[in-house]
Image: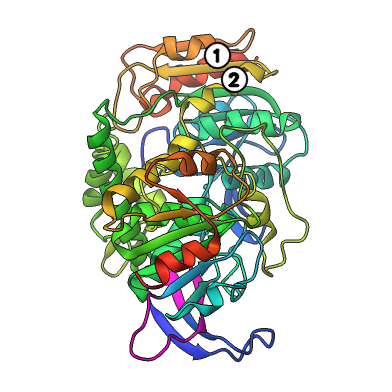
Amino acid sequence: MSVSKAKNETDPTDPVSDVTWLQHNRIRLALHQLKEGRPRGHGNPLLILHGLGELTRLPADPWDHWSGPIWGLDLTGHGQSQVPKGGGYTAEVLMGDVDVALAHLGPVTLFGRGLGAYIALLVAGARPELVNGVVLTDGSGLTGGGEGPQSSTWYLPADADGRAPDPYALYELSNDVRPSDYAIGFLQLLLNGSELDVPLVVAAKNRPPWLAAVAKDPGVVCEGLPQAFERYNQS
Amino acid sequence: MTTSVRTFPGAKTPDRSWIVDSSGLSIAAYQWGSESGRPLLLAHGGFDFARTMDRFAPLLAAQGWKVIAWDHRGHGNSEHAALYSWDADIRDGVAVLDSVTTEAVPVVGHSKGGALALTLATIRPDRVSALVNLDGLPSHRTVPDIPDRERTRVMASDLTNRLDFRRRAHEGARKPGTIEELAARRKKMNPRLSDDWLEYLVTVGGSESDDGWRWNLDASMRFGGFGPFRPEWSLARMPGIAVPMLAMLGTEQEEMGWGTLPEDVEPWLPPGAKLMPLEGVGHFLHIEKPDLVANLILEFLA
């Protein structure tokens, strides 16, 4: 991982946030600081993981009242992060994107939308010591490709022009297989490795099979966003 | 193309090599045999490269086939990619095939290449006229049968290890060495192959610089895929295959193989498919017994 920081002057659509550039193998990732924390170190940092095809942005209530600093990561092929050539996306490589951000930020609370919720579960299981709670919520790309292998499909985007969101990402990450027992494997790692009583909250209203299995686990709490906010803002 | 500084009996430099653009990624393609030959696509295995076919491919070419192979992304002389997946490999392979013909061709694949060929035949059946699978049928997990608690611990350390590696992957470079040292490293994964062959491979799959030879393989690739994919899902594709299929299995189990047994495969075979276990042969059956394997394929395609 290497880090460089610059006031974002390259993208006029994003004039407010500071961008820190992180390197994950061949991809340069954009980590946005969406809000500074209140002085004197109140509250955890929050890291927002966007949904499939989305831009990183400050969430609506209650998270915009989060007392710690708020960061957001553009996953590979999204936002200001680099778009690779010729696709080949997996959820596991995006887990690596987030882990590179954790190496830079240290412990954070993860707030994942859609695809970002699934990635948040994976990375929280892999790095429980760097995650102060995970909140999984609705958003694009929540379902993925289901429990088992689907019919084979052929896809070659005509519009892959290097601009984000990468059409390969849109396609491959809405078809990646997400078996429940695979998701539960990561949840078990999180429950075993976390010091929190409740390391994961399901706030999503939609529950594709992987998320229904996670939500049913006795170690997981299902509650609304305001409650999840209360739970982790001061922890 | 790398100039060979070693030779191996029967090994032949491809008659032609070219670069194919696959969605912006440069993929190295090769051909053994004459322009007028009938095209056949050959897919190498994981961590191999097209020129591991230097001994085997000419045997098919000598009988009138125009044998087309490519280096998978990150392998051989193909570009090192940011992302790797089997779906992406299949797209790269079809881009190579498109550069030669738009017709259906026989597809021969070894190991991972055999599994790719199987998927290709279900994704793009219009491009596959016959299927030959050389010890490329994943059938079950290679993880040993261990208690759940232990499995969780193994998964945790595997994950940490992989993510630690990814954090440093952009600094990665292959370790240099002499031809003999690189061959010895590869021997650990290919214990049944001869030193002479492995040393030859270094000279066609590696590059020499001031401090020695390095394999051309992308240093950011790790052995053993990680993810939700289950090997047995590959077998489930077989019953739907509509073209003639020949599958060979090496019965000597070794590191790079999937440990698949004939009885794992038989229930899934499509109608009319032939399964041939080769006794006393390991995973690299086309390297160990090139003439035998080539003759079986030529007979099957005749």
Mark-to-mark CA distance, 1 and 2: 6 Å
Percent of width and height locating residue B203: 36, 51
Percent of width and height locating residue A100: 40, 68
> Left or right: B126 with respect to B75?
right
| B153 up-or-down from A17: above or below | above
Dot 1 amino acid type? Trp
Chain hosting mark 1: B
Bin the neighbour count of mark 2 within 10 Å (Cα to Cα): few under 14, some 14-19, many 20 and up: many
Chain hosting mark 2: B
Disc sitting over residue A135 in the figure = none
| A154 up-or-down from A66: above or below | above
Disc sitting over residue B268 in the figure = 1
Q: For the residue labelled by badge 1, is the local secondary structure a helix, a strand or a loop?
A: helix
> Left or right: A86 with respect to B190?
right
> Left or right: B145 with respect to B14?
left
Disc sitting over residue B238 in the figure = 2
